[in-house]
Image: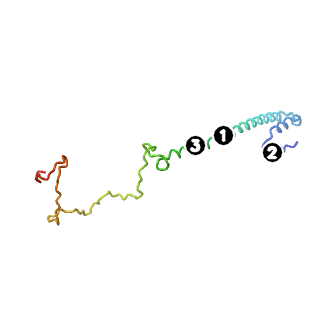
Amino acid sequence: MSNHYLMRKPLDIEKVKEVLASEEIRKDSSPAVLALTGIVFALLEEIVELRKENEELRRENEALRAENTMLKEKVRELEIRLNKDSSNSGKPPSSDGLKKPPAQRSLRERSGRRPGGQPGRKGITLQFSENPDRIIEHPVETCNQCGLSLKDTAPDKI
């Protein structure tokens, strides 16, 4: 008997069952052969069930992949909408809500020193002069509070 068809892939289960049920196999009625034939039949039935389950899982997997692709696209669109504000779209500033964009940070690295004059620096202040080059008078003509004229009022009373 030639068993070359048993080595094909994928396994033709009906053909294997046909061979196992043939007269040639039944002629040899040793208990070991009959036991092995029963085991092979059980394994063939399990293979049939596993193939059915595999096909169902493949269909489910394909449906889930399609749904996943659709959901990823939807998330991408929603993230784009969420990241839009008045500065990067045609939306009015009032639609920005209370969320303010973060302040622009300087790219310059910190030196570690505090702002202003550094310790040890000699300061220069404009000094009051005893003999000014000129004197400019700024007479007060009206009261800042009530608006009355101060022309006839002595300077020391103002």
**Which residue has dot 3 on it?**
74
Side (left or right) of 1 relative to 54: right
Q: Residues within 10 Å of mark 1 (few under 14, many from 20)?
A: few
**The N terminus - image quarter:** top right
Q: Is residue 44 left or right of residue 127?
A: right
Residue beneath the point at 35% across and 57% down: 112
Q: Residues within 10 Å of mark 2 (few under 14, many from 20)?
A: few
Q: Which amino acid lies under the numbered mark 2 shown in the image of this protein?
A: Arg
Q: How is the image coloured?
A: rainbow
- Spatial separation of the CA atoms under disc 2 and disc 3: 46 Å
What kind of element bears circle 3?
A: helix
Mark nearer the N terminus (3 vs 1): 1
**Image position of 40 with respect to 156: above or below:** above
Residue 25, position as x, y percentages in the image = 86, 36
Q: Position of residue 40 (x, y in %)?
A: 79, 36
Among the 4 quarters of the image, the one containing residue 140: bottom left
Front tag of 2 and 3: 3
Q: Residue 120, percent across and down? A: 26, 62
Horizontal side of residue 140 vs 27, given as left or right:
left
Give whichever of 16, 37 is nearer the camera: 16
At label 1, which amino acid type do we have?
Ala
Q: Nearer the viewer, residue 2 or 64?
A: 64
Q: Which residue is mark 2?
A: 8
Q: Nearer the viewer, residue 85 or 105?
A: 85
**Residue receiving disc 1:** 63
| Distance in Å between CA atoms under marks 2 and 1 | 31 Å
The earlier-in-sequence mark between 2 and 3 is 2
Q: Residue at x 14, y 64 (%)?
A: 130
